[in-house]
Image (tube, helix red, strand yellow):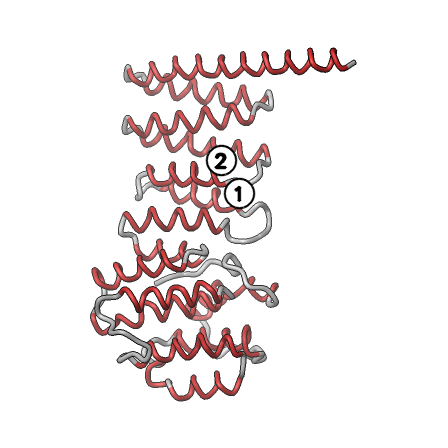
Amino acid sequence: MAAAAAMAEQESARNGGRNRGGVQRVEGKLRASVEKGDYYEAHQMYRTLFFRYMSQSKHTEARELMYSGALLFFSHGQQNSAADLSMLVLESLEKAEVEVADELLENLAKVFSLMDPNSPERVTFVSRALKWSSGGSGKLGHPRLHQLLALTLWKEQNYCESRYHFLHSADGEGCANMLVEYSTSRGFRSEVDMFVAQAVLQFLCLKNKSSASVVFTTYTQKHPSIEDGPPFVEPLLNFIWFLLLAVDGGKLTVFTVLCEQYQPSLRRDPMYNEYLDRIGQLFFGVPPKQTSSYGGLLGNLLTSLMGSSEQEDGEESPSDGSPIELD
């Protein structure tokens, strides 16, 4: 019996080696076609092989072939073909129900970084990638994938989109460094404090207290226009500093007095008090408003920011909540 099992295992290994060798030979032929400029023929062959492998449940072979093919087309400036194969990479992940792993997330982020930033395929790709990476949990995507996307968008100087993905990652330090660059390159000197205040309040609305603290500390230490503190010259920065301390303490009276004392600073952005209403509910036991005093776009923004975090008020998670619409 043991000998038979060993023989079967050896045969399986040989078949696996032959299959891998076959994939490599096919890959070599496809690469040669692309190198010769036969892009259309090569693209169609990649698609044919993908569906053949998928029908044989060879999901890993299908995914790896599409990934290498996408990189090859990207290197030859064939954006459409590369984007199509990138979608097939996702399709293989979705249909095979593959578990999320760092290597797969890094591959998806690599493909994303090579796509034309203005292509509609990129929007579709990132939406599907995030959905797959959530593992069916209903969350907004894996924090590691959000971090990788944020770093790519930061390099492209797409600061608003980068901020969105940092908010759903666990990388408060990276977010702070991006915001320093955003503020110094695009912002007014008078708004230095507002860049970090918005991020801290939004992190807290997503119940990510640790990243809120890290983004504040890193930003205030590294921003060239902010003098050493606390205390700070800017009243809004002092408010955020006190707020983070109050969140740790959890005392409603401290939170209430703090918000009252800093109303002149909080009136600089109409969203601040709405964020603080939600923070009061999450960390200080303030009951939700019976009727909303805001509506329209403002109400929609708050609903999208705070929606699903109500389901798990007892836990702190960087990926809780619904998408944040950033201005």
Establish if 249 lies above or below 185: below
- Farthest-out residue, front: 2
Relative to 150, 36 lies left or right: left
Q: Amino acid at mark 1?
A: Trp
Q: Residues within 10 Å of mark 1 (few under 14, many from 20)?
A: many
**Depth check, front residue: 252 or 134:** 252
Q: Residues within 10 Å of mark 2 (few under 14, many from 20)?
A: many
Q: Estimate the x, y position of residue 301 in percent, counting from the top left.
A: 44, 66
Q: Quadrant of the N terminus?
A: top right
Which residue corresponds to the image point at 46% horizontal and 46% vertical from the top-left? 127
Establish if 294 lies above or below 202: below
Q: Quadrant of the C terminus?
A: bottom left
Which residue corresponds to the image point at 38% horizontal and 40% vertical from the top-left? 112
In the rendered structure, find residue 132 and report the number of the disc placed on it: 1
Across the whole image, how many numbered discs are drawn on residues? 2
Relative to 224, 97 lies left or right: right
Mark 2 and mark 1 lie on one chain; the one further toward the N terminus is 2
> Dot 2: what SS?
helix
Q: Amino acid at mark 2?
A: Leu
**Depth check, front residue: 136 or 301:** 136
> Dot 1: what SS?
helix
Q: Estimate the x, y position of residue 131 in percent, counting from the top left.
A: 52, 46
Is disc 2 in contact with disc 1, using a CB cutoff of under 8 Å? yes
In the rendered structure, find residue 90 and report the number of the disc placed on it: 2
Relative to 173, 185 lies left or right: left
The answer to whether one can see residue 123 in this image is: yes
**Depth check, front residue: 63 or 175:** 175
Q: Quadrant of residue 310?
A: bottom right
